[in-house]
Image (cartoon, grey):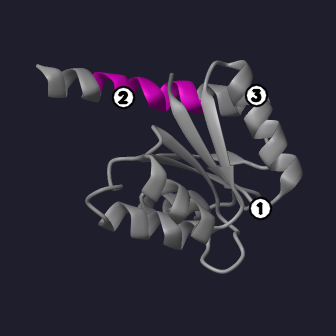
Amino acid sequence: MRTILIVEDNPMNMELARDVLEANGYRVRGTTSAGEALQALQESLPDLILMDIQLPGLDGLELTRTLKQDPGTKDIIVVAMTAHAMKGDRERILEAGCSGYIAKPIDTRALTREVARLLPAVQEEAQAKVL
């Protein structure tokens, strides 16, 4: 079962994303800050991280940059969640190391599609390592 870590400080967004992902067969863990996310990553690594961009303290893009510079976490797929899906934001998000983004308010179909689009890459990568 694939594991997804949600880093989101808004309880309603967290609950919606968790419900949708669990209904689609994913194991979900949730954290509300960059510090909690870093602690969760020390315990176990997820297949994918849904990252709120506007977190208190260290923001989601800075946390993503930190994760992408660390050899232990650089290969984790990160998907940004943002209410700021304006021109130029997509480029900033991708430059930080995110593989995609979900606009807020969360469209449950878009969330499901984006996660499904990105996770097969994880499976293919794992199979390649076995060969």
Instruction: Determine if the magenta segment contains residue 122.
Output: yes
Residue 17 in view, yes or no: yes
Residue range highlighted in magenta: 114-124
Query: In what quadrant of the picture does the C terminus appear?
Result: top left
Q: Which residue is mark 3?
A: 20
| Measured Cα–Cα span from mark 3 to mark 1 | 17 Å
Decide which of tag 3 and tag 1 comes sooner along the chain. 1
Q: Secondary structure at mark 2?
A: helix
Q: Nearer the viewer, mark 2 or mark 1?
A: 1
Residue in front for this viewpoint, 104 or 76: 76
Coordinates of residue 10 in the picture (x, y in percent): 83, 58
What is the total number of numbered labels drawn onto the structure image?
Answer: 3
Q: Which mark is residue 9?
A: 1
Q: Amino acid at mark 3?
A: Val
Main secondary structure of the magenta stretch? helix
Q: Which residue is mark 2?
A: 121
Give the CA separation, mark 2 to mark 1: 28 Å
State how far apart marks 2 and 3 are (Cα).
Answer: 21 Å
